[in-house]
C-alpha cells in the first residue's frame, strides 16, 4: 500500500503543462462536493492530499501559488455557480455578466488559497509539519477573505460539518475558523502516508491521531447536546411567512398590492390543527416591495393583520423624507404595531457589491442587479432592537449573517438573531443551502437562537446549539408557527473571546510544525522536482 501511495504521489507531483492546473482545479471542485447540500465529506481527503502532492512537485514559488490558485478557482466556480441564477432573473439586462461574475469572482477569491499554498511552501516544512502549516495557512487566509474587499466569508471549509449537530458545537469555542482548521488538517493528514520524510510507524500514527481528534470533537459535541435543554421564551409564538413570490414578479408595480394582500392572508390564517395563535408575524427581505414607511394605507393594513400586543416585522426599502437631499435609499427592516405605526427600524449595513450598489460608480456605468437605479446606502451597523413583547434581537438582512463575530453590535447583547433574506434570486441551486449553513453556525458561535425568514426558503427556527427546530423547504409557500427558543444563560467562549482561541491554536500548531522529527525541508531537497 505504501509503495502504491508513493508511486501515486510521484505521478501527481510530476504532472506538467496543462495537466497541472486542470488537476488542481479538479481537486478544488472535488472539495466543493463536501459543502451543503451534498456533504460528501470523504472527498475532502483526495482533494487536500492531492493539493499537497501537487505542491510537492512545485519547486518555484510562482508554481506553488499557481497550484493553490487553480485549486481555489475550481472550488469557487463550483461553489458559487448559483450567482448565475441571480443574473438570469433579468436575463436581457444582466446575462452578459455571468462569465465575469462567476469566473471573475472565483479568480479573485482563488488568490486566498493561492497565498495559503504559497505560505505552506515558504514554511519549508515537510511531513506532518507541512500538514499542520497548510491547515493554519488555509484558515488564516479564510479569515482574511472575510475582511478583504468588504469581506466574503462564503463557503468556509468548516461549513461541511453542518450535517452533524454534534460537530458544530466546536464553533461555540473556536468559531467557524477553528472548525475549518481541524477540517483541513484531518483531510490532508493521509498525505504523510506517502511521504519519504516520515517513515516507520509515525505516518500511520499521525493519521490515527487525526481521526482520534475528530472523534473527540464529535464526542464533546454529543456530550454538550446531551445536556442541552429545549427552553423557550414564554409568551412568544412566532409566525414566519414564506410567500415564495417569484423574483421576476416580485417588483412588478401592477402586482405589488396583490403580493401584499397574499402575505396579509397568510399572516391571519388560523393555526393548523387548532394550534396556538401567533403573537408576532415576520416576513422576509423587501417583502413589501415599496417604501412602507411612506405608505399610510399599507401600514394600516399590516397593522390590522398584526396580533394585539405584538408586531409584524418585514423587510422594505426606505427612502429619505420628501424634499430631503441628497436622495437616499436603504434596504431596511421595519416593525409595525397593531396601530399601523413603525416602532422599530434597521437599515442594512453590509451591502452586496454590484448587487445593492456599484463600487467606483463614477467609473463604472452599468446598473446594480437589484431593483431601482439608485444604489442602496449603508446603515450604521449591527445593533440591538427592542420591540413589544419580544426579547431584544439583532436584525440582520441577507448575507450579513455570514460574517463570524460581526452579527451583534455594541451595548446590549441580543437574546436572538433575526435574519431576513430573499434567496429566490438563486433558484433551486446550492446557494440557499450554503446560506442557511452559515446562518446556523452564527447561532452556535453566539449561543443565541436564530430565526431565518426567506421569501422562497429555506426559512427556519434554529436553537442556540444550531439545531433546526422547524423549517420550510426551498420553494414551498407556507408558514411556520413556532416558539422562540431561549438563549443560553451564559454566553459562549466565542461570544466572549472572539477568535482568540483559534489564534492560540494556530500559533501552537505552527510552533509544533517546526518541532516535527523530520525537521524542515532544505533548498536542495531531492524529493522536489527541479523542473517545476
Image (cartoon, rainbow, N blue to C red):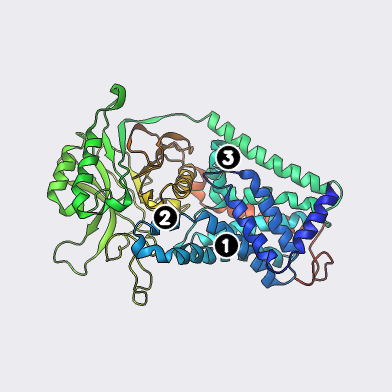
Q: Which residue is mark 2?
A: 85
Would you call the spot at circle 3 few (<14 residues within 10 Å), some (14-19), or many (20 or more)?
many
- Percent of width and height locating residue 521: 79, 64
Image vertical order of residue 206 relative to residue 485, above or below: below
Q: Residue furthest top?
A: 274
The foreground one among 222 and 260 is: 260
The foreground one among 449 and 118 is: 118
Position of the C terminus, as image quadrant, is bottom right
Image vertical order of residue 263 relative to residue 89, above or below: above
- Distance between the Cα atoms at labels 3 and 2? 31 Å
Q: Is residue 194 left or right of residue 436?
A: right
Q: Nearer the viewer, mark 3 or mark 2?
A: 2
Would you call the spot at circle 2 few (<14 residues within 10 Å), some (14-19), or many (20 or more)?
some
Q: Which residue is mark 1?
A: 73
Q: Nearer the viewer, mark 1 or mark 3?
A: 1
- Percent of width and height locating residue 425: 37, 52
Mark 2 falls on what kind of element? helix
- Residue at x 40%, y 38% (from the top left corner): 460
Q: How many marks?
A: 3
Place residue 120 in its image quadrant: bottom right
Q: Which residue is mark 3?
A: 167
- Distance between the Cα atoms at labels 2 and 1? 19 Å
Q: Which mark is residue 16?
A: none
- Distance between the Cα atoms at labels 1 and 3? 28 Å
Give the mark nearest the N terminus, 1 or 3.
1
Mark 3 falls on what kind of element? helix
Amino acid at each position: 500500500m505504501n509503495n502504491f501511495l508513493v508511486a501515486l504521489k510521484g505521478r501527481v507531483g510530476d504532472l506538467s503543462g496543462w495537466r497541472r492546473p486542470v488537476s488542481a482545479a479538479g481537486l478544488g471542485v472535488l472539495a466543493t462536493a463536501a459543502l451543503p447540500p451534498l456533504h460528501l465529506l470523504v472527498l475532502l481527503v483526495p482533494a487536500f492530499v492531492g493539493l499537497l502532492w501537487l505542491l510537492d512537485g512545485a519547486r518555484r514559488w510562482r508554481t506553488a501559488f499557481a497550484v493553490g490558485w487553480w485549486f481555489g478557482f475550481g472550488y469557487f466556480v463550483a461553489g458559487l455557480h448559483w450567482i448565475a441564477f441571480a443574473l438570469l432573473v433579468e436575463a436581457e439586462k444582466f446575462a452578459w455578466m455571468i462569465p465575469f461574475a462567476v469566473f471573475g469572482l472565483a479568480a479573485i477569491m482563488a488568490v486566498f488559497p493561492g497565498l495559503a499554498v504559497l505560505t505552506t511552501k515558504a514554511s519549508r516544512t515537510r511531513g506532518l509539519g507541512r500538514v499542520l502549516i497548510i491547515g493554519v495557512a488555509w484558515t488564516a487566509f479564510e479569515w482574511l477573505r472575510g475582511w478583504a474587499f468588504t469581506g466574503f466569508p462564503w463557503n468556509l471549509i468548516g461549513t461541511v460539518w453542518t450535517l452533524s449537530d454534534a460537530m458544530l458545537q466546536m464553533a461555540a469555542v473556536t468559531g467557524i475558523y477553528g472548525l475549518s482548521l481541524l477540517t483541513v488538517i484531518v483531510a490532508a493528514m493521509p498525505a504523510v502516508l506517502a511521504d519519504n520524510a516520515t517513515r516507520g510507524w509515525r505516518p500511520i500514527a499521525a493519521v490515527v491521531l487525526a481521526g482520534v481528534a475528530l472523534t473527540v470533537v464529535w464526542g464533546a459535541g454529543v456530550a454538550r447536546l446531551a445536556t442541552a435543554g429545549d427552553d423557550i421564551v414564554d409568551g412568544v409564538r412566532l409566525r414566519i411567512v414564506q410567500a415564495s413570490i417569484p423574483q421576476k414578479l416580485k417588483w412588478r408595480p401592477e402586482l405589488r398590492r396583490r403580493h401584499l394582500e397574499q402575505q396579509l392572508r397568510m399572516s391571519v390564517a388560523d393555526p393548523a390543527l387548532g394550534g396556538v395563535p401567533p403573537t408576532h408575524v415576520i416576513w422576509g427581505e423587501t417583502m413589501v416591495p415599496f417604501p412602507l414607511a411612506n405608505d399610510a394605507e399599507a401600514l394600516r393594513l399590516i397593522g390590522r393583520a398584526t396580533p394585539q400586543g405584538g408586531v409584524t416585522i418585514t423587510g422594505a426599502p426606505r427612502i429619505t423624507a420628501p424634499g430631503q437631499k441628497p436622495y437616499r435609499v436603504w434596504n431596511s427592516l421595519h416593525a409595525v404595531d397593531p396601530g399601523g405605526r413603525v416602532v422599530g427600524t434597521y437599515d442594512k449595513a453590509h451591502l452586496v457589491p454590484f448587487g445593492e450598489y456599484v463600487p467606483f460608480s463614477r467609473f463604472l456605468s452599468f446598473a446594480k442587479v437589484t431593483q431601482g437605479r439608485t444604489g442602496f446606502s449603508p446603515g450604521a451597523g449591527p445593533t440591538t432592537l427592542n420591540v413589544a413583547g419580544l426579547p431584544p434581537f439583532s436584525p440582520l438582512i441577507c448575507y450579513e449573517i455570514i460574517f463570524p463575530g460581526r452579527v451583534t453590535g455594541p451595548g446590549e447583547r441580543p437574546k436572538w438573531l433575526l435574519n431576513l433574506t430573499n434567496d429566490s434570486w438563486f433558484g433551486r441551486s446550492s446557494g440557499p443551502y450554503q446560506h442557511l449553513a452559515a446562518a446556523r453556525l452564527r447561532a452556535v458561535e453566539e449561543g443565541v437562537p436564530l430565526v431565518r425568514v426567506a421569501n422562497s426558503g429555506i426559512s427556519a427556527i434554529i436553537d442556540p446549539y444550531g439545531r433546526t427546530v422547524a423549517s420550510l423547504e426551498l420553494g414551498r409557500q407556507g408558514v411556520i408557527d413556532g416558539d422562540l427558543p431561549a438563549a443560553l444563560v451564559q454566553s459562549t467562549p466565542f461570544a466572549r473571546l472572539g477568535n482568540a482561541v483559534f489564534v492560540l491554536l494556530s500559533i501552537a500548531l505552527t510552533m509544533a510544525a517546526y518541532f516535527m522529527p523530520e525537521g524542515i525541508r532544505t533548498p536542495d531537497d531531492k524529493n522536489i522536482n527541479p523542473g517545476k
